[in-house]
């Protein structure tokens, strides 16, 4: 607000809103392991009024450090938003339903209780009548995927309950030798792909925030070695649940167009260079500037978007727009007029 000759003039400041994605199961160097894109999301959160991301980027098993201005959105809901089919409304979800296979171990009960007393939300346990069976494997191009059984029965059962957001905690079946190879030598996280697939199937029918936590199978407790720092959150976690509860507590609700945040309010989509999927395609149609980060390599390859060497350069471009300046004017040399 400015004062001119005794008259107050209200000066509108345009909001800055960004979408940060790290697609699951493609071996992203940053964010492709276990919550290792948290610093990236925090960086763009500091430059934005709202930063939208998805569970894969910030879920670090029992750790989630996403900023307060972050909207935690599953892949299907993010697609609907970028398609312009829905708007997103900020929410603090206080009633979370968690669906689990039986038997339920004491670690799961304790994890639920711990999240209830620290987040201050109701978390209701629902034992599935039909097992949700998730089996992970690699596709021919090296990406992680898998099969999902029992998801339709899960939808039928959870639809009988009133809740704000849905957490799912079930075992992801992965051969022990595959897990050990990943822990020792890295590569593509084997279970993230099938988790994303299951959440997409279920989210498309319940239209509420959703995230999955893989129940620990015993392999991790048998493995006690120093690992790549990007995998470390997994090694120190017990149930992998708290990141999901914290994210769902801050997950936005979908709402009708004309209310909340619209795709036209988004300024940037920030992505690893090695991917070009549905989010990129629709962002391009909406004239959202796409920044592809070269340093964040994947097993895929893309040829589109504005290429940035690293996230620091991408952050500089976002900061320039927020400041109302062109990036070329913070570089040298400049051309003579």
Image (cartoon, grey):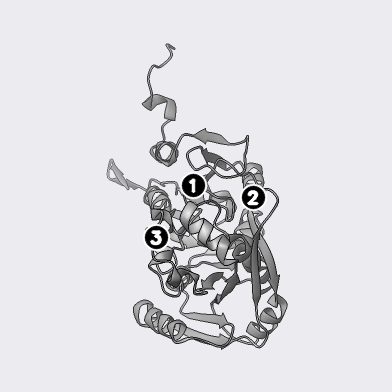
Using the numbered discs, state the Cα–Cα distance from disc 3 to disc 1 in whole angstroms. Answer: 15 Å
Dot placed on the residue nearer the N-terminal end, 3 or 2: 2
Dot placed on the residue nearer the N-terminal end, 3 or 1: 1
The residue where tag 2 is placed is: 142
The residue where tag 3 is placed is: 232
Residue closest to the eye, 218 or 191: 218
Q: Quadrant of residue 284?
A: top right
Numbered circle sitting on residue 64:
none
- Residue located 48% across and 66% down the image: 90
Q: Secondary structure at mark 3?
A: helix
One can see residue 54 in this view: no
| x and y percentages locating residue 230 in the rendered image | 42, 54
Q: Quadrant of residue 316?
A: top left
Looking at the rendered image, the disc whose residue lies closer to the viewer, 3 or 1, is 3
The residue where tag 1 is placed is: 29
In the picture, which quadrant includes the C terminus?
Answer: top left
| x and y percentages locating residue 228 in the rendered image | 41, 53
One can see residue 16 in this view: yes
Q: Are marks 3 and 2 in contact (CB under 8 Å)?
A: no
Residue closest to the eye, 33 or 302: 33
């Amino acid at each position: 607000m400015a004062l001119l000759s005794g008259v107050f003039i209200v000066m509108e400041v345009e909001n800055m809103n960004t979408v940060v994605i790290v697609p699951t199961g493609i071996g992203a160097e940053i964010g492709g392991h276990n919550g290792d894109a948290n610093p990236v999301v925090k960086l763009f959160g500091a430059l934005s009024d709202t930063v939208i991301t998805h569970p894969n980027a910030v879920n670090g098993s029992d750790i989630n450090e996403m900023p307060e201005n972050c909207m935690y959105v599953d892949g299907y809901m993010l697609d609907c938003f970028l398609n312009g089919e829905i708007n997103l409304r900020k929410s603090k979800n206080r009633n979370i339903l968690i669906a689990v296979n039986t038997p339920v171990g004491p670690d799961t009960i304790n994890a639920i209780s711990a999240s209830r007393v620290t987040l201050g939300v109701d978390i209701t346990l629902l034992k599935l009548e039909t097992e949700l069976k998730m089996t992970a494997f690699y596709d021919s191009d090296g990406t992680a995927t898998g099969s999902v059984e029992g998801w339709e029965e899960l939808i039928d059962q959870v639809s009988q309950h009133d809740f704000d957001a849905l957490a799912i905690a079930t075992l992801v079946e992965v051969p022990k030798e595959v897990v050990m190879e990943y822990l020792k030598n890295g590569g593509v996280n084997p279970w993230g792909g099938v988790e994303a697939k299951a959440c997409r199937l279920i989210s498309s029918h319940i239209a509420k925030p959703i995230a999955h936590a893989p129940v620990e199978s015993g392999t991790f407790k048998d493995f006690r070695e120093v690992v790549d720092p990007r995998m470390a959150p997994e090694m120190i976690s017990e149930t992998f649940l708290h990141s999901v509860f914290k994210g769902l507590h801050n997950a936005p609700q979908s709402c009708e167009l004309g209310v909340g945040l619209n795709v036209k309010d988004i300024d940037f989509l920030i992505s690893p260079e090695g991917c070009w999927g549905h989010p990129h395609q629709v962002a391009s149609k909406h004239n959202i500037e796409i920044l592809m980060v070269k340093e964040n390599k994947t097993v895929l390859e893309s040829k589109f978007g504005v290429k940035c060497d690293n996230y620091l350069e991408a952050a500089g471009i976002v900061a320039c727009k927020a400041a109302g300046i062109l990036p070329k004017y913070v570089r040298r040399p400049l051309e003579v007029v």
